[in-house]
Image (cartoon, rainbow, N blue to C red):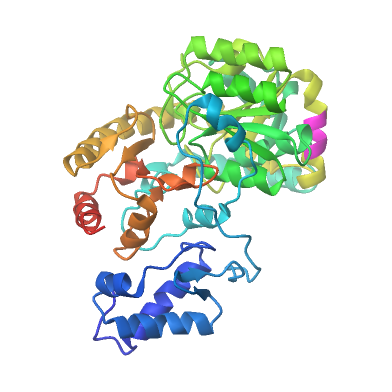
Amino acid sequence: MLTRTSTQSLTGQLADRLAERIRTRLLPPGARLPSVRECARQQGVSPYTVVAAYDQLLAQGLVEARRQRGFYVRDSAPAQDGRPSGHGADANGVSAMPAALAVQMMASRVPADASSLIRSMFHRPSDKPQPGMGVFPPDWMASTFMPTAVRRMTSTAALQELSLQYGEPSGDISLRRSLSQKLVGINVPATPDQIVTTIGATHALDIVSRTLLRAGDPVMVEEPGWALEFARLEALGMRILPVPRRADGPDLEVMAQYCKLHSPKLFVSVSVLHNPTGYSLTPGSAHRVLKLANEHDFHIVEDDTYSHLAPEHATRLSALDGLQRTIYVSGFAKILAPNWRIGFLAAPPALKERLLETKLLATLTSPTLFERALSWCIDQGQLRRHSERVRIRLDGARGRAVKLAMSHGCTFASEPAGLFGWVDTGVDTDALTQRMLDQGYLLAPGSLFHARRPPSTMMRINFATSQDATFWKVFSKVRSEL
């Protein structure tokens, strides 16, 4: 908060705060700053102080003044690494419409610089619990078996074996065998030869896109969905076709229209514990999706990042399809350690070598030491037992977070499940996010999960980090002021 006891003037404090948010992209290019009067009210200072702070931002080249419209973050504002950012966001996104009317509008390229919002997900404004974060708190991930596994792999003999030569391009064979057995448990038929390890699940998704697509190709992606996937495909020059996600699966009417009008090459789906809604695919919907894929000749990449939190009997497209048109992707960042960066894909035999060539061009191999350590964790049952403990703890956290959210006037747009809740706040969550930053809390606004970033009253909460009653009291107070 701004303080009059600081050695720095109120003007300087306000200018520095806004400049930091612009540089870390918590205020993305194209974002409108609050009006002078509104900012003065929010910060408890005079309009003169705000004008002086905005003048400093103008002098630094971080914002621009638009006649009779206000102050906006410049599109050329420098990012943290000093490089210029992309174009500003287009706030005029397509809202919910009947499928037949919306398809043509929804098929255009994504106009938003979504990377600005993605960067915000890695920026902690304070040491308080952050409801907008996408991972478990560090204390949830702590274990003794992971250090043990790494120590086993770094004994003198083992370390020499792993360090003095390139690893197997497809990934360490012991891990691929472990993964093959693990996939059998969820009825996904993948031999070790069909598996390619990657540097996280995001890398696996990128390998699939770079192998199967070319710039300009149409790709169907569930919406709401993962912001990084929208931004990644946009950066590759793909034409994104957002498919509304329902409780039972993707909107099949919209998919059918896309297939007739655009002949999409790929469909990206999170079948189980969908982010951000928590929905899981039903068998009936899965069969119809696979029927469309066969009729219209497109592949499906199934992102099963949250598999460790889901019941084994959950419906998966890859299990029903037998890895014919489907490519299965998963990883371990959510359940073990975000920085281990181990993921994998399981593919049809006819596609495996093409996908491996793409991996070779980007990274040659992936880190054998951590892959072999992970294999030990799986084979010894450590990963399974750890996942069970996390699921039990998450069930309790989810119940507490849901009660707190509802007691403070929020409603859930979907049945709470998994790590995330999809919450309706009743107010514009882009504006709410900026106000909550002043209080030290990072939110995940609804616009983050849409290709065109339309204004939204929704936000995603992380059940593991949303149990703090103090947060909800602050949230309720700030929301009432909007």
Does 10 lie within the magenta span?
Answer: no
Does 355 lie within the magenta span?
Answer: yes
Instruction: Please tell me which residue lies in front, 173 or 226.
Output: 226
Residue located at (41% from left, 79% from top): 15
Instruction: Please tell me which residue lies in front, 10 or 466.
Output: 10
Instruction: Please tell me which residue lies in front, 285 or 394.
Output: 285
x, y (%) of residue 132? 39, 49
Q: Is residue 187 visible?
A: no
On screen, residue 54 versus residue 463, left or right, reads: right
x, y (%) of residue 407? 16, 40
Compared with residue 276, is residue 453 higher up or lower down, i.e. above or below?
below
Residue 329: name its quadrant: top right
x, y (%) of residue 167? 77, 40
Residue located at (54% from left, 53% from top): 90
Residue located at (69% from left, 46% from top): 159
Q: Is residue 409 visible?
A: yes
Residue located at (50% from left, 49% from top): 92
On screen, residue 203 versus residue 283, left or right, reads: right
On screen, residue 164 versus residue 138, left or right, reads: right
For the C terminus, the image quarter is bottom left
Task: Report the span colored magenta.
Answer: 354-358
On screen, residue 445 versus residue 378, left or right, reads: left
Compared with residue 441, is residue 258 higher up or lower down, i.e. above or below?
above
